[in-house]
Amino acid sequence: MYGKAVGGIYMIKDMEATKKKLISVSDLNADLINAMTEKQLQSYIQALEVTANTYPVQKEELESAFRTMDYALVMQWLKIILSSLEQVNADNLVKECEKHFDVNQDIENIRHEKLRIFIEYYLPTLELFFADVNQALDSLEEIELKNEAQPEKIIPKLLTISDLNAKKIEAMEEEELDDYIENLNYFHENFHNQEQGLRSAVKIKHYAFVMQYLTGIEESLGKIHADGLLEDCQKQIELLKDFNNIRQEKLEMFAKYFLSTLSMLAADLKQLHLPKHMPKKAKKESKDEIKIEIEIIAPGASPDSKTILIVNKMKIFMSSIKSALGDANHKILGITSGVAALGYLRTSKPDLLIIDEELPGIDSFTFTKTIRDMGQMTPIIVTTSKITKESAVKFTEAGVADFIVKPITPGDVQKKIAKHLP
């Protein structure tokens, strides 16, 4: 239907199919979309993506202003949201706001209860709208352009992002670029989970978790040469080493600033539409390259300890599970590859499996079915950012015993593990 060209410009292949998909979002103005030229449609799709990416931050700031009863700031954020909706011709949602609440009204005469009722109705409506927008954008078929992954085209795109070290990028050899692109994609794909985890850890004052999430972010920033942000992260990690002298207010301010900056970097990377991989020269396969890497994170205290196998591409997540369990008498093994985990499970039987919904190398549903077909009856817990009725039924039928919704908390981890390892 459409392809993403260099610089984030959409190359429309099937105008009618693309318009039909966008019009399926009921709150968008169908007449205006139908009347668009190819160039207008390219810009419109880009505007939709930007609007969808920035809304979560706008929503959070609006809710924060309302909680503190800063009505002037509430009105300011409402106007910003309305401006974004107007840019993508979400006319019904603009009219809905104007109908139920006047953003230009006298601040001193605002009724708190009326504002509360409006926000509690309007924000969920926007959530549904942006969910539909994201679904429509995700379903548009991408056309891979021949020159998209050429090094001479990729590097200039990267140099437009000020948070990345331009000198290091310009000095890269062609063979280094593929690994760098993978690191950029990894940062972008995992930022949301790291962000939610860090926010949650700061909020509940679990400083060990804060340290672990920052350490994971530090590793990612180092790999993508975001040196300025890396330095900020390292300074905060140094301050966190002394738990007794942590000032919660300063930590909260840092987290808000730092995560907002990282969010902008993630948005910038998304706008570049980088390929998943650069083309590599064919090479002979070697059996030596197939490795099963198992990291023993927390050896059990006795021979009777139960074994928990965690399959997750983020080692920081494994450390979070370890911290949540504290001194519990369990042996924790971590494998960062779904395929490697299958190799391990062919000869070993842990007492409990904790797998992520997004496994590298194999999707989690296929992974679950495969180990059940192997005769493994070990209880399986799936960690996920969102659990729907459909996904719950699908996983349960495949043999999953339970779920942990991210960002994880020590209480959730302890409760679920105790349930399946009595």
Image: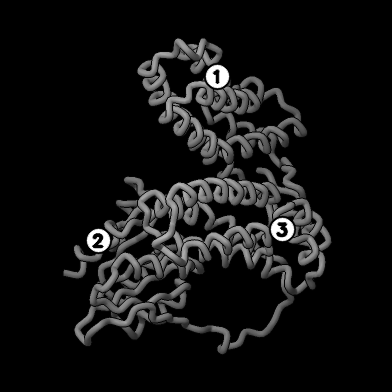
Location of residue 46 in the rendering, given as x and y in whole percent from the top left corner: 68, 38
Q: Amino acid at mark 3?
A: Leu
The numbered dot on residue 416 is 2
Look at the picture and state if 174 lies above or below 65. below
Nearer mark to the viewer, of 2 and 3: 3
3D distance between C-alphas at marks 1 and 2:
44 Å
Instruction: Indicate the secondary structure of the residue bearing disc 2.
Output: helix
**Is 413 left or right of 293, judged from the image as shown?**
left
Q: Residue at x 78, y 70 (%)?
A: 172
**Is 333 left or right of 281, judged from the image as shown?**
left
Label 3 crowd (10 A; few <14 / some 14-19 / many >=20): some
**Earlier-in-chain disc, 1 versus 3:** 1
Label 2 crowd (10 A; few <14 / some 14-19 / many >=20): some
The numbered dot on residue 174 is none
Q: Which residue does the numbered mark 1 point to in the structure image?
A: 94
Location of residue 68 in the rendering, given as x and y in whole percent from the top left corner: 43, 30
Instruction: Indicate the secondary structure of the residue bearing disc 1.
Output: helix
Residue extending farthest to the right is 152
